[in-house]
Amino acid sequence: MPDRMRVICRSEDLQERGPGVRFDLPELGERVTGFAVRYNGLPRAYVNRCAHVPVELDWNEGDFFNVARDYLICATHGAHYQPETGYCVMGPCKGKGLVKIAVFECDNEIMIQLDSIS
Ligand code: FES
């Protein structure tokens, strides 16, 4: 496994458009978290910080999708983000985006690459 790769969960922990898996990101500071979801078959991971105000997206832990389960949503003011890109399409931070984390699936494990976080 290359340096700075970290296993965050098993493949079966990420169900299509299901609850997200949260993980700590001490590299980015105290109490900073990230999350991963599965969307259109692939894992997607982001820093769990809204582009509007730096708060976590999920009020209910692990709850990242909107009701239709086609966008990631911030529980605070309702910003909607594309799950594939993290781009904000609706809400107070429209046009901005979540910080993406490179994520891989291999041997039934989901891994993030920490070097990819800036
Ligand atoms: S804090 Fe996320 S939309 Fe305002």
Image (spheres, helix red, strand yellow):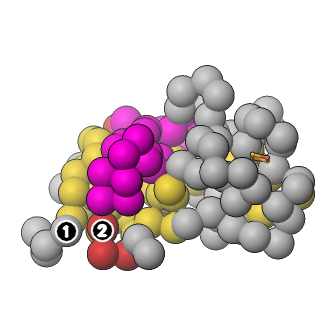
Locate residue 16 relative to residue 24 in the image: left or right.
Answer: right
The three-letter amino acid code for the residue at tag 2 is Gln
Residue 89, horizontal then vertical, whole percent: 84, 63
**In front here: 50 or 88?**
50
Specify which label sits upstream in the sequence, 2 or 1.
Answer: 1
Which residue is found at the position 88% from the left and 54% from the top?
91
Which residue is found at the position 76% from the left and 56% from the top?
52
Q: Quadrant of the C terminus?
A: bottom left
Please tell me whether residue 19 belongs to the stretch shown in magenta. Answer: yes
**In front here: 94 or 104?**
94
Which residue is found at the position 55% from the left and 66% from the top?
99
Which residue is found at the position 74% from the left and 35% from the top?
75
Mark drawn on residue 4: 1
Disc 2, disc 1: CB below 8 Å? yes
- Up-down: is 33 above or below 91? above
Locate residue 14 relative to residue 5 in the image: left or right.
Answer: right
Please tell me whether residue 107 belongs to the stretch shown in magenta. Answer: no
Q: Element under label 1?
A: loop
Mark drawn on residue 113: 2
Q: Quadrant of the N terminus?
A: bottom left
Q: Residue furthest front?
A: 30
Where does the magenta region start and end?
13-35
Residue 40, horizontal then vertical, whole percent: 59, 57
Q: Is residue 110 visible?
A: no
Q: Is residue 100 visible?
A: yes
Mark drawn on residue 23: none
Q: Residues within 10 Å of mark 2 (few under 14, many from 20)?
A: some
